[in-house]
Amino acid sequence: MKILFVGDLSSYARARQRYLALQDLGYRVEGLSWVPLETELESDYKPPLWQRILRKAGYPVDLVRLNQSLEAAIAEHQSDLLWVEKANTIFPSTYRILKQNFPKLKIVYYSEDDIYIRNNRSEYLRRSLSLFDMVYTTKPRNVDELPKLGAKNIFCIFQAYDRNFHQPLTLSAQDREHWGADVGFAGFFERDRAEKMLFLAENGIKVRVWGFNWQAWPHQHPNLILEGKPVHNEDFVKVLNATRINLNFLRKINRDKHTSRSLEIPACQGFMLAERTEEHLQLFEEGREAEFLNPKKNFLKRFSSICLMKTYDKR
């Protein structure tokens, strides 16, 4: 089977890991990135205001002329399947042209995000959902919700890890010192996450945080160590391996019941502390393969007690 894969092919993106996984499975896969790859080298890159306004309104700008290049790419590679991840810039008219000119082509859409939530989709995507032959989601609610937007053949699957990438490492003492922590988290800033980690810091537990936008959090604390930068690729795996307790927070806006971290941390044989959900309990044996907390029952008190026990039981 010949596949044209459209997604974020930046070196640090999970879409790129799936792109490479399809190649490992023996498929002939060609890739198109909807993200300008040169911007990944600019850690402080911020789109101009007019682009941010259009994206917020639901009409993101096609910065790589994806709509113009898709048809030629499919014809050149004689693709049997078009695999699309996010790519909110593809017009519904583009999909219609592809279905008309390549009647045997199957179009599959995959999303890690909750695309029923407006913030996670564009108007282009909303009007394209009825044109996909299959839609894969990691959100069970979407199975009943997305048909309201025209989607059909919806399949819910768990998130995944890359077996060639997320794995236990033998780290040097220098690496453990450089990347590790008693308690750590790698990810974007969100107020709910910040408040929970601030609680730990105020109760004597040092927490090391990797990711963007944390420096603007006004409630700083000496025990809350903000690195001010993300970790990707091998560095990210080193952090998971070197950290005694890896915190795994669920994104409320995504209505998450598990995340990519839910698979990546255990794949590295790291200790994972996360919220107790039905999906987490389906994946792991509580108390043996991961530790979970009920967010509605003395969450913060139990949260800090587990962190204290785990960080000091190896000293």
Image (tube, helix red, strand yellow):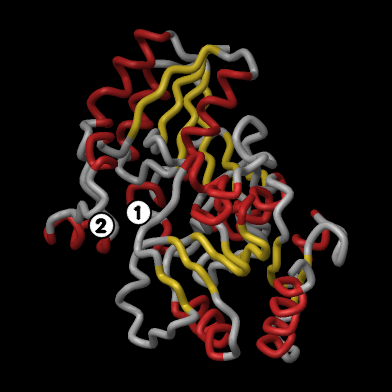
Q: Residues within 10 Å of mark 1 (few under 14, many from 20)?
A: many
Residue 120 image position (x, y, % from top left): 42, 58
Q: Nearer the viewer, residue 275 or 223?
A: 223
Residue pictured at 53% horizontal, 12% vertical = 28
| 160 to 308, vertically: above or below | above
Q: Residues within 10 Å of mark 2 (few under 14, many from 20)?
A: some
Residue pictured at 53% horizontal, 33% vertical = 17
Residue 152 image position (x, y, % from top left): 59, 43
Quarter of the image holding residue 101? top left
- Compared across the picture, whether 220 is left or right of 307 comes to left
Quarter of the image holding residue 49? bottom left
Residue pictured at 33% horizontal, 47% vertical = 124
Amino acid under disc 1: Ser
What residue does disc 1 label? 122
Amino acid under disc 2: Arg
Instruction: Give the mark, 1 or 2, whose residue is nearer the N terminus.
Output: 2
- Compared across the picture, whether 95 is left or right of 58 comes to right
Helix, strand or loop for disc 1: loop
Q: Nearer the viewer, residue 40 or 3?
A: 40
Q: Nearer the viewer, residue 229 or 117?
A: 229
Closest to the camera, between mark 1 and mark 2, is 2
Q: Quadrant of the N terminus?
A: top right
Residue 71 image position (x, y, % from top left): 32, 19
Residue pictured at 27% horizontal, 63% vertical = 56
Quarter of the image holding residue 66? top left
Residue 101 tag number? none
Residue 112 image position (x, y, % from top left): 54, 50
What residue does disc 2 label? 55
Helix, strand or loop for disc 2: helix
- Measured in 3D between alpha carbons, the distance from the residue under mark 1 to the one under mark 2, in whole angstroms, is 8 Å
Badge 1 vs badge 2, beta-carbon distance below 8 Å:
yes
